[in-house]
Image: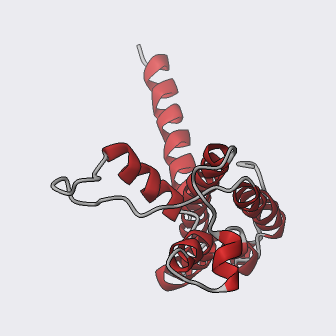
């Protein structure tokens, strides 16, 4: 994916546009790429990350709010970190957290019992989709700000400097 050629209009954006596309990508994985005009990667991420999230729901995966203060009775560092990664999926996780306390039909359909047979596997799928969306959003930021091009240019200049130093007596 790193060698994908981007159209000139997708190379550098203003910081406001970049942050808007990143926020959109956080809310619905893949949509930030689509809005920025990076269609192939956008549709691929949309299908894979949201598919992984939906598979997690199909396996009765859950997202529960952990105790966030170390003084709280149910505080656990692993639970806090896992929750933070799951939140990186964005809109889907926020919807699950909102529906957890809801008595609506949608809430009863999507929020399941964490003690069922495959709920750990489902929760793992939710965790993976959140982690991958974090990396996809950071990559989108790099693409739209041109940070990857700047790093490539610095690397080439460093190689040139190193080769000149080796040639010097």
Q: In which image quadrant can residue 26 be found?
A: bottom right
| Whole-percent x, y for residue 50 in the image | 74, 64
Placement of the C terminus among the 4 image quadrants: top left
| Whole-percent x, y for residue 30 in the image | 71, 68
Specify whether residue 149 is in view: no
| Whole-percent x, y for residue 115 in the image | 58, 49
- Residue that appears at 49% across and 85% down: 16
- Residue that appears at 47% across and 36% down: 158
| Whole-percent x, y for residue 32 in the image | 66, 75
Q: 34 above or below 42?
A: below
- Rendering colour mode: secondary structure
Farthest top residue in view: 169
> Is residue 84 toward the left or the right of residue 148 in the image?
left
Q: 137 above or below 122?
A: below
Specify whether residue 19 is in view: yes
Q: Nearer the viewer, residue 95 or 51?
A: 95
Farthest left residue in view: 71
Q: Nearer the viewer, residue 158 or 107?
A: 107
State the count of labels.
0
- Residue that appears at 52% across and 62% down: 88
Q: Nearer the viewer, residue 34 or 104?
A: 104
- Residue that appears at 63% across and 78% down: 107
């Amino acid at each position: 994916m790193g060698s994908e050629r981007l159209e000139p209009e997708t190379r550098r954006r203003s910081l406001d546009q970049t942050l808007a596309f990143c926020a959109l990508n956080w809310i619905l994985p893949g949509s930030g790429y689509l809005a920025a005009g990076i269609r192939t990667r956008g549709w691929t991420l949309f299908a894979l990350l949201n598919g992984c999230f939906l598979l997690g729901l199909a396996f009765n995966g859950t997202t529960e709010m952990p105790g966030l203060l170390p003084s709280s009775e149910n505080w656990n560092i692993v639970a806090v970190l896992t929750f933070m990664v799951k939140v990186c999926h964005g809109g889907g996780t926020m919807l699950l957290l909102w529906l957890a306390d809801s008595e609506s039909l949608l809430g009863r359909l999507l929020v399941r019992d964490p003690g069922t047979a495959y709920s750990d596997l489902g929760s793992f799928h939710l965790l993976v989709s959140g982690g991958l969306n974090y990396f996809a959003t950071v990559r989108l930021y790099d693409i739209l700000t041109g940070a990857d091009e700047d790093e490539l240019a610095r690397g080439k200049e460093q190689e040139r400097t190193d080769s000149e130093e080796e040639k010097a007596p």
